[in-house]
Amino acid sequence: MIIKRLLILTPLAVFLFFLVSFLVASRNFDRKINQLILSSSGDAEKLNPVLSLDSASSDINGFVFNGLVKYNEHQELVGDLATGWRIEQESWFYLKPDAELAPEEAVARLRQELAGGGLEAAQIVSLEVAPKRGVHLLARRAGKFIESELRKVVPEQLLRPVHTLPIMVETSRKLADGQPANAAAVIARLTAALAAHPTLGAQLLEVIPDASYRFEVVALGEVGELRAWLEAFGEELAEKPATPAAAKKPAPLLRIAAAGRELFVHEPIITFSLRDDVRWHDGKPFTAEDVEFTLQAILDEKTNTVRRPMFDLVKSFTIVDPQTVRVRYKRPFSASLPNWSMGIIPKHLFAGQDINSSPYNRRPIGTGPFKFEEWVSDEQITVVANPDSFEGRPYLDRIAYRIIPEAPLTELEFMTKGVDLHAPQPQQYARISADERFQVLERLANGYTYIGYNQKVELFKDVRVRRALTMAINRQEIVDFLLYGLGVISTGPFPPQMWYANPDVPPIPYDPARAKALLAEAGWRDSDGDGILDKNGKRFSFVLMTNNGNIVRQNVAVLVQRALKEIGIEVEIELYEWSVFIRDKINPRNFEACVLGWSLSLDPDVYELWHSSQIEKGFNFIAYSNPEVDRLLELGRTTYDQGEQEKVYRRIHQLIYDDQPYTFLFVAKATPALHRDEFRIRRQVDHQVITEPIRMTEVGLLYYLTKWYRARYGAMLAQ
């Protein structure tokens, strides 16, 4: 009898629970202010744009902070904290000592060409003779394009090459006077010694500090003798070891990398004009000092940031006046302007603090359209409208950012109006899109999902192994059955709709038989007949990690586990809460393989993801290294012409896909869902106020977020 009652009462209790949940949610919904409720599967880590790594932190930072520039609806850069900017470039070239052409004559020829309408593309505005048989010019454009224009007038064979010697200081050693070895100490002694040298001093152009352990020596002509002198000087400068001669020889004080060679020196300059009507959320005025402080924080080696590569080519920063700053770069850097879309932080709050542990990383003060209100860990982050926003008060009063780790619970919250914006899982898409209560928008995402192989792990160092793993995984099946057709197979580091993606890279075919053959070539065979490949007594077994709460990634892991078992590879799956996954596994490089995804910006620069310099502290946590990719990434960063950039990045696309540091799985469609007609956009077009439905833009759904409002409040806004 008891069992029968339980069988009857249990479903009734479950029904009543969901009914009460629905009624409470509906009641709360009716009481809602003009707010938007968003959700995330993981909590934020640090609400600081200098430090943030995860998507939740980035979302909140986007509400609270502003950059100097931003992208508009048409993917064009426009001012944000800056009202405008001017890009210029100073350039130099040097004539050989025995060249018949004197610098004065070269300047005269160039001026004559300019007067006759030549060199128009270069946009040169001034020319003058420079020391050491040099010519200096200022142009209203940046980039290396100017070189071809100058060669029309000054033959290349007359030019003296300029070499840049990158030098690393062995900071574990001391100088002969007992002082710690660092770049600043070495530079001070080195420049004095070179200035006094009878021949090498005439070659030296400048010494550029780069970090506490790194600097560059820029010199004219061939540098074989200079390199030898620098190596000897370093040993003279270093403290002599107090160990016997038979002891291990200490590392050289100065390690000199291969010299870069150029015939022209270029230093682009961006001058930003800043808004004078911006205040931080605590009422203090925003000034040029905040921009300077943000840059200094990023470049400070004690700051735990992955943003440093975005700004490590900055040579100098000058505050012209409280509303004007000038940034000079060491060489052309095509991403220099879009990188200033990163949020600026307040000097008056962070100065004198350890930025990594500042309490303002949990209580952010920004300049953005929304002000931070509350953060309840693992539950909710709340921001409210900034009435003093320089862009005007947002129409929404409040944004609640709820942390809901489980996807089914997120859907339930969306259905009961506990969440306003939902990213349906593929298996939910058909049902939600067919429901008249909801509006579903779609576009191919600016990102992709992948399996990353840690190449510091011995298993994954052989490219044949990585290619075999990809061949063994049926990526089309993943798109068809896990994404329900809402996506395409990824063929590399750029989604196909990006202008710089290589359309001629085909996906590696699904071919388990060929995968087995490649593994056999690499020495992996089932020598003991247990069904698992082995090599030198080691089984081919690894742990595949991903974050809990992402059903697609979890299902990918299961399918990959099953597929690799078919070819004799054992895979164990581990799931972690998002913040734990990033903090304890990915950031410290404590993993073998992982299922993750990248969301990319509109700029093609992916230096932070793929350059070998980013292995230890950057986003290249899988330790990928390819010297040719490094070279092309550096070239892409110095190329401003879009046509040339396209060639560079399409080659990068091909090389990375050939190396298979990831199994590039898919580019999914973004399919955000809203409650139909619940929100609208109110904005000005041609001096007239219009209202329109929520729509997708080229830069995403939330571009007009400050113009969103709940439809029921439309009459109030019109008053």
Image: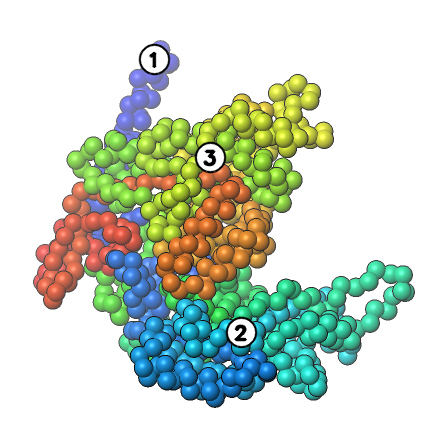
Q: Quadrant of residue 290?
A: bottom left
Query: Compared with residue 656, is residue 191 higher up or lower down, i.e. above or below?
Result: below
What is the three-letter code of the residue carrying label 3?
Ile
Q: Can residue 50 be spotted in the picture?
A: no
What is the three-letter code of the residue carrying label 2?
Gln
Nearer the camera: disc 2 or disc 1: 2
Q: Which residue is mark 2?
A: 157
Which numbered disc flags the more N-terminal residue, 2 or 3?
A: 2
Nearer the camera: disc 2 or disc 3: 2
Nearer the camera: disc 3 or disc 1: 3
* Neighbourhood count class around disc 2 (C-alpha, 10 Å): few under 14, some 14–19, many 20 upward: few
Which numbered disc flags the more N-terminal residue, 2 or 1?
A: 1
Tell me how far mark 3 sits from mark 1, CA to CA.
58 Å
Secondary structure category for the residue under label 1: helix
View extreme (top): residue: 1
Q: Which residue is mark 1?
A: 4
Q: Which residue is at 30% across, 32% downward?
A: 428
Query: Compared with residue 512, is residue 576 higher up or lower down, i.e. above or below?
Result: below
Secondary structure category for the residue under label 3: loop
* Neighbourhood count class around disc 3 (C-alpha, 10 Å): few under 14, some 14–19, many 20 upward: some
Tell me how far mark 2 sits from mark 3, CA to CA.
46 Å
Work out which quarter of the rendered image holds the C terminus and state it.
bottom left
270 or 645: which is nearer to us?
645
Percent of width and height locating residue 115: 33, 84
Secondary structure category for the residue under label 2: helix
Percent of width and height locating residue 333: 45, 66
52 or 267: which is nearer to us?
267
Q: Which residue is at 59% across, 24% downward?
A: 568
